[in-house]
Image (cartoon, helix red, strand yellow):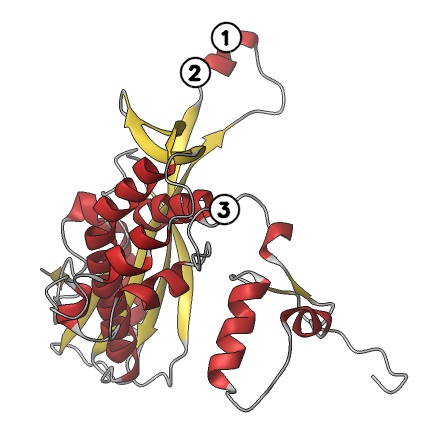
Amino acid sequence: ENGIRVKYQKRFLLFNIREVHQLFVQDNPGASISRSSFAEFRPTYVLPKKTLAHRICICVTHENVNLLLKALSGHVQGLTNSLNTFLSKLVCDEKQESCMMSSCDDCINKFQLLIMNKITDDEKIIKWFQWINTNGRAVKQVFSGLVLQCVKQLKDKTPSHLRHVYIKRKQSQYFEDIKTNARDNTVVCQVDYAENFSMDNQDKIQSAHWGKNFVPIFTAYGWFGGSGGDGQSFGLVSNSIIHNLFDSSVFRYLKGNVKKRDSVTLGQAVTCFYFTEMTQILKTHCVYQCVIISRNDSVLL
């Protein structure tokens, strides 16, 4: 800038250029700029998501709908492979529970009017992908059929997708509210399973290659009340490969760190909120709600 070298941190777009352009137009209704011109203004340190490594842990509900939209984008008039645009087509108000739960009288016929009736050639044969479970494993399988068949599959998935998006947004909003309004005796912790780290030796015998040991790693971040939004990240290891056995390690770590806080005194109750994506295992986002820092230097659950 102005002949001076400036160091910038790399930033990655989590949306494609078309979606970012749409968001810009929504936030700046008075601005008039084409998508190609908008793309030219992208700073060199802001990189598209295709430059990232392979994405993992993406949501199967979102991805399966996204794969159907990609297949149908050229066969349904006005339909693009944008989840946000698809959502806005089908509901009156994305913040209304009745719309997102498919119980709104005004939204009930929108799929028929804006998707089904806009098919350009319902007899054309196309291919599409879907993630399915086969013998206990997730497999990305290709399907072939009429455009109308693909549209009907999208229609079947739409109610659960809308419900999923609404619940996810409510959970995210609750998560942000908990962090923002945390009191001095509140701890908000987000913890998730990261990977089974393979224990390898630099030089090993051949038979050892087929009998590797693994160490489960959990990544976590804790926000402490009164910290002004700042928190602390930490990684945890476990001696069990069962992915939901992280609670004892987390509690041992938090016990030592919570007690170091000036705002926490012995005998004071500390409310601890846990958030995790492992809901199928834990069945709930809030695992434990109360941790007592007692006078005998122990944690009572």
Q: Give how far across and how far down residue 31 sits, in percent.
A: 59, 88
For marks 1 and 2, give the CA distance. Answer: 7 Å
User: Please, what secondary structure does the residue beneath circle 1 have?
Assistant: helix
Nearer to me, 114 or 217:
114
Q: Residues within 10 Å of mark 3 (few under 14, many from 20)?
A: few
Q: Give how far across and how far down residue 253 sits, in percent.
A: 30, 59
| Residue in view at x 37 percent, y 35 percent | 130
- In primary-sequence order, the first of circles 3 and 2 is 3
Quadrant of residue 90 in the image? bottom left
**Nearer the camera: disc 3 or disc 2:** 3
Q: Which mark is residue 211?
A: 2
| Residue in view at x 32 percent, y 39 percent | 148
User: Identity of the amino acid at label 1?
Assistant: Ser
Dot 1 corresponds to which residue? Answer: 207
Count every numbered label the image shows and give the total: 3
Nearer to me, 59 or 79:
79
| Residue in view at x 30 percent, y 33 percent | 241
User: Please, what secondary structure does the residue beneath circle 3 have?
Assistant: loop
For marks 3 and 2, give the CA distance. Answer: 28 Å
Callout 1 touching callout 2 (CB < 8 Å): yes
Q: Give how far across and how far down residue 159 sits, in percent.
A: 19, 54
Dot 3 corresponds to which residue? Answer: 55
Left-right relation of 37 to 209: right
Left-right relation of 267 to 278: left
Q: Residues within 10 Å of mark 1 (few under 14, many from 20)?
A: few
Q: Give how far across and how far down residue 203 sits, in percent.
A: 62, 19
Quadrant of residue 49 in the image? bottom right
